[in-house]
Amino acid sequence: NEIDIAVIPGDGIGPEVVTEAVKVLKFVTNGGKQELKLTYYKLGAEHWLETGETLPEETLSAIKQHDAILFGAVGAAPGDTRIPSGIIEREMLLKLRFSLDHFVNLRPSKLYAGIESPLSNPGAIDFIVVREGTEGPYVGNGGSVRTGTAHEIATEVSVNTAYGVERVVRDAFRRASERERKHVTLVHKHNVLVHAGHLWKRTVEAVAVEFPEVTHDYLHVDAATIFLTTDPSRFDVIVTDNLFGDILTDQAGAITGGIGLAASGNINMDRTYPSMFEPVHGSAPDIAGQQKADPTAAILSVALMLDHLGMSEEARAVEQAVEKEITSRQELTDNRTTSEIGDAIVALLA
Amino acid sequence: NEIDIAVIPGDGIGPEVVTEAVKVLKFVTNGGKQELKLTYYKLGAEHWLETGETLPEETLSAIKQHDAILFGAVGAAPGDTRIPSGIIEREMLLKLRFSLDHFVNLRPSKLYAGIESPLSNPGAIDFIVVREGTEGPYVGNGGSVRTGTAHEIATEVSVNTAYGVERVVRDAFRRASERERKHVTLVHKHNVLVHAGHLWKRTVEAVAVEFPEVTHDYLHVDAATIFLTTDPSRFDVIVTDNLFGDILTDQAGAITGGIGLAASGNINMDRTYPSMFEPVHGSAPDIAGQQKADPTAAILSVALMLDHLGMSEEARAVEQAVEKEITSRQELTDNRTTSEIGDAIVALLA
Ligand SMILES: CC(C)[C@H](C(=O)O)[C@@H](O)C(=O)O
Ligand SMILES: CC(C)[C@H](C(=O)O)[C@@H](O)C(=O)O
């Protein structure tokens, strides 16, 4: 009865926040009957600079053997021109999400007591975004002709399948059915993106029939950004495509006090491959190695991981410890070190 | 010396707000040497219900003859299932933008004194979004196969050309060069949408050379929604594609007190066809016909129109009258009627 985790600390503040997440993971599992096995993988921009590797096939195969993946953050320092722009994001992070069929990109948004929102009237923000993770404009299905000339044409193709849309929509309804408000909002832009939009809309209508207790509505993505500003407490479960989900979850992070607190799971609900849990924030090279990063998002990602691994009691305990710790803060950016915050959360777990 | 305007009041609150916009237009032009000719076109959801027409070729040809177009709003009441979803938007509004080559979709965002932002710390918000208007995912270049089956695939193609990107980027730099802060921010997602993103990035680099006095930077669209929440005063001129521009300008409307105040111009800078000026808000069927709509966005759109027609003095006068009127408001939703607000602005112009 062992849990076997692949750990990818990555670049910048990644290793620091992952250290705290591992601290929490160790504490929680040692209390139980579980044994914890951790295997570290060195990947990311630093690793690319040293080896030229993004994600070799053998590494990917090895990662596939674990129960789950704990991911820190990747990305070169801005302005570091040695690394081709976007290569780590696409050939490592997105490659993991796609190769491991992480079709549910789960991103909870909660405004914790004690955290100041940049909105003057935020209300009670507590929703989850179920972002599709394996399709949409993220498929890398673009190209260009006459590149670099005055006659260049560059295209990007958003690919959406009934198979891909249905499984993520069903996941969203299932999650909604387990929540108090039991409401799903589909976000798309079907008045312009007719074909993809109608596939999403039809799928929501069809899946909704299986969940008579769950209500649902629809918002265009532009209108959704308005409501995230003026009335975010209206949302319970948002289901949307890969690109709209990327945009809305950063906005959602901002209104709940910054993506420094936002956790995420890249989840393969069929469990054919390990799921991956990562803070939404990036590698923040400007504050890396200084113990200035807030490990909360990484620790909350551990809670999502425990949940996925069936350890929901432990997941709740971590969430509650984090919530208590946050509520006790005077202000968001206090002067404690990354590891002091991790220790405080462990202390509350004890 | 006549100005010859096509007026498309449209649906819902469109006719009411356009009446006030016309009031202002009449006042401003009668004071000068200009004669004002107005030709009304009945188009929109109501018109479709009566005739089945969206935008007939003869109507489009007739509209092309005018100097500019004043547009209210279109759209059926939500839940009106008699009208195929999105048909008015695509076959009328977008058809006008595309047929008349409105490549600059100009959307200023300003937080006026006296208007409360939903942000607790908005700072001095005063930027413009130059949204591309004739390309991107809006080209209608999508399709689906095996539609309605479990094997459906639906695609949407974003089309970007050097020609299309360059002209709008140059327009953004030109506008920036005439502003105080002289700064352009390109918003895209080039780490994922590599081909389109790199065309945009390369074009910005190339055009920037022509404008040494203008600085520029880059933001991913997800990060842009964060900064629009936490630090919107950082923006001066945003240039972006059709879809990202749609999303960001609604968010920009929200942080500056609601899209009830947001004006826009669909501009053909080559002047091969008339440009079209419209409030960003929709037809708001729920409050239509009750004199509850705020005509400010429509009136500010008239200012953009006057500017485009070379009447910059009149444009400034309208803007200043609006600014004064807004500053004198006690709260955003006061109890005055649509026409009382229009009258108040005209009184301030006098
Ligand atoms: C780094 C980037 C490829 C990634 C995405 O766009 O999905 C990030 O923004 C995220 O949201 O996890
Ligand atoms: C109605 C719709 C087609 C339109 C758009 O997406 O451009 C609207 O949202 C806008 O921003 O003017």
Image (cartoon, coloured by chain):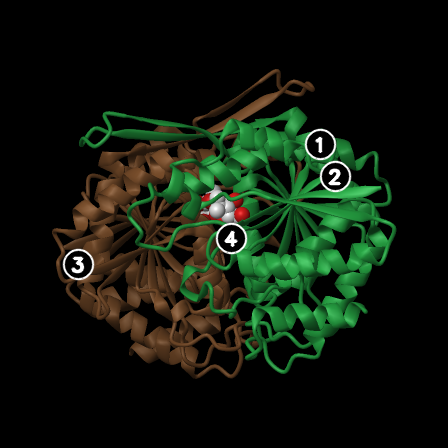
Chain colours: A green, B brown
Mark closer to the observer (3, 2): 2
Mark 2 residue's CB less than 8 Å from ligand 1: no
Is the residue at mark 4 from the same chain as the one at mark 1? no
Foreground disc of the pair 2, 4: 2
* Amino acid on which disc 3 is placed: Gly
Quadrant placement of the N terminus of chain B: bottom left
Circle 4: element type: loop
Whether residue A131 sits left or right of residue A152 in the image: it is right
Q: In the image, what residue type sits under mark 4?
A: Gly
Residue A245 appears in the picture as rendered: yes
Do the residues indicated by labels 1 and 3 lie within the same chain of the protein? no
Could you tell me residue A283's position as x and y percent? 47, 56
* Disc 2 from disc 1: Cα separation: 6 Å
Query: Which residue is pictured at 60% across the width and 53% down the height?
Result: B285
* Residue named by callout 2: A171
Give the camera-side residue of B280 and A117: A117
Q: Looking at the image, is B307 positioned above or below residue A121?
A: above
Is any atom of residue B74 visible in this view?
A: no
Graded by Cα atoms within 10 Å as few (under 14), some (14 to 19) or many (20 or more), the crowding at tag 2 reads some
Q: The C terminus of chain B lies in which quarter of the figure?
A: bottom left
Apparent side of residue B300 relative to residue A344 in the rendered image (left or right): left
Q: Tag 3's secondary structure?
A: loop
Mark 4: is the Cβ under 8 angstroms from ligand 2? yes
Circle 2 sits in a helix, a strand or a loop, which is it? Answer: helix
| Residue identified by numbered label 4 | B282
Would you identify the image quadrant in which residue B102 lies?
top left
Which amino acid type is shown beneath numbered disc 1?
A: Arg
- The residues bearing labels 3 and 4 have C-alpha atoms spaced at a distance of 28 Å
Mark 4, other Cα within 10 Å: few <14 / some 14–19 / many ≥20? some
Identify which amino acid the numbered label 2 is placed on. Asp
Disc on res. A167: 1
